Each structure stands twice: as structure tokens, then as C-alpha cells.
Amino acid sequence: MIDVRYVSFDCARPYELAIFWSQATGGELHPGTVPDDEEILVVGPNLLFTRVPEGKSVKNRLHLDVTGSGGTTREQEVERLTGLGATVHEDRRNPDGTGWVVMLDPEGNEFCVCRADYEKQP
């Protein structure tokens, strides 16, 4: 058995991307974080952002699937995340309410916004 310590993101601007994900998840930047740090940790979801010299060039092989919490809907979260700097990449919502929205964070990393269990019809 293993424990997942962090989900790591290679990026050009770790501080800025960590701020986006901190606001998106409600997580906190690790105490003592300095904007010029090469690695920035968002505590809570344990997301680690590491500065790398090369840019993103292909689709992510791993991505996060996220849902609303505290009663927010998929649509409300898509709107909120867009306001934080994400963009809609592909809209895969279906008329019956199933599906998801593929979004890109400010550095182009894909993530999906899905319906929370409380949004699904029994």
C-alpha cells in the first residue's frame, strides 16, 4: 500500500498557479511560501507546483476531476473557476444532466468539472 503525498504540476509560474488552485480548492499556501520559490505547496488538497523550463506541449496524462461542495452545482463551479482564470476547453454536458466540462487552468493543464453526488437524480 502507498499514500499519495502530493499531486505535482510542472509549470512556468508556480506561485501564480498555486494561487489559482488555492482559490479554486479553498486550500492554503504552505506557511512561509515566498513568491519566488521554485516549489509551492497548496496544503489541503496537497498540490505541489514546481518550476520547470519547458512549456506544456501535449495533453495531460493525469488530470483532476473536481465537483462542487457545500451545495454548489457543476454550472456554478464552471462559472466561478472561469472567474478565477480557467477557461472552458470542451463542454461535454448532456441534455439529461450527465457529463462534464473540461477546463484549462491558467497554464493550460486540463481538469474536469463533474456533477457532485448531491446533484444527481436518484
Image: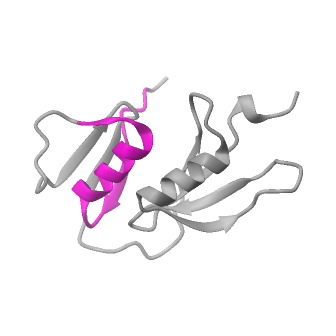
Where is residue 117 shown, x and y percent of the image? Answer: 72, 30
> In screen coordinates, is 48 left or right of 88?
left
Q: What's the residue at 44%, 76% (across, down)?
A: 57
Q: Where is residue 107? Give x, y as percent.
A: 39, 67
Left or right, residue 27 beside residue 34 = right
Residue 101: give x, y in percent of width and height.
66, 57
Residue at position x 36%, y 32% from top?
Answer: 5
What colour-coding does the image apply? one colour
Q: Is residue 2 above or below residue 108?
A: above
Which span of residues is magenta-colored? 3-29
Q: Give the percent coordinates (x, y) of residue 18.
A: 30, 50
Q: Nearer the viewer, residue 56 or 23?
A: 23
Q: Say which of 65 and 77 sits in front.
A: 77
Nearest the viewer among 5 and 105 is: 105
Total labels: the figure holds 0
In the rendered image, which quarter contains the C terminus?
Answer: top right
Residue 29 falls left or right of residue 71: left
Residue 16 within the segment the image draws in magenta: yes
Task: Locate residue 63 relative to residue 4 in the image: left or right.
Answer: right
Q: Which residue lies at the image location 50% right of the left edge and 73% below the top edge? A: 58
